[in-house]
Image (spheres, grey):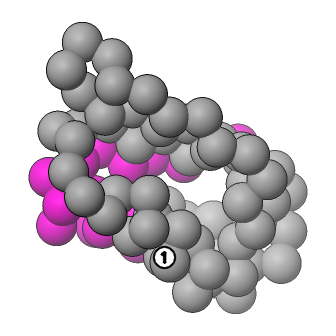
Amino acid sequence: MNAIVTVIGKDKVGIIAAVCIKLAEMNVNVLDISQTILDGKFTMVMAVDAANANVGFEELAAQLRELGEGMELSIRIQL
């Protein structure tokens, strides 16, 4: 199951690492990443393969949302 992860917020060190670590913990493979600073905001779009995830899609979305809240970012996943 392929999905798109979006990350938006104030730029800071470690955003890409934190998101990739969280995805790896849930056995989600990163297929592609595009990131830039857009109008002063960090923006990242990731194509991921969640077919072998060790959690369901709703839990995956919840954990990413929680990570985002802790880092003052908006992190969303959609199919």
**Amino acid type, residue under disc 1 in the picture:** Lys
Up/down of 43 relative to 3, above or below: above
> For this view, does 52 lie left or right of residue 37?
right
The image quadrant that residue 25 belongs to is bottom right
Residue most extreme to the top = 39
Residue at disc 1, secondary structure: helix
**Residue at label 1?**
22
Q: Position of residue 22 (x, y in %)?
A: 48, 76
Q: Is residue 66 visible in this depiction of the protein?
A: yes
Image quadrant containing the N terminus: bottom right
Q: Residue at x 72, y 60 (%)?
A: 30
**Residue 22 placement, left or right of 2:** left
Assess whether residue 65 is covered by the magenta stretch.
yes
Image quadrant where residue 29 sits? bottom right
* Left or right of 24, for residue 66: left
Residue 57 horizontal/vertical position (percent): 63, 65
- Residue 53 is situated, as x and y percent measured from the top left of the image, at 73, 78
Q: Residue 31 vs residue 21: left or right?
A: right
Residue 50's spot in the image, x, y percent?
76, 65
Residue at the image point whose x is 62% and y is 80% from the top = 24
Query: Foreground: 61 or 30?
Result: 30
Magenta stretch? Answer: 63-79
Find the residue positioned furthest to the front. 13
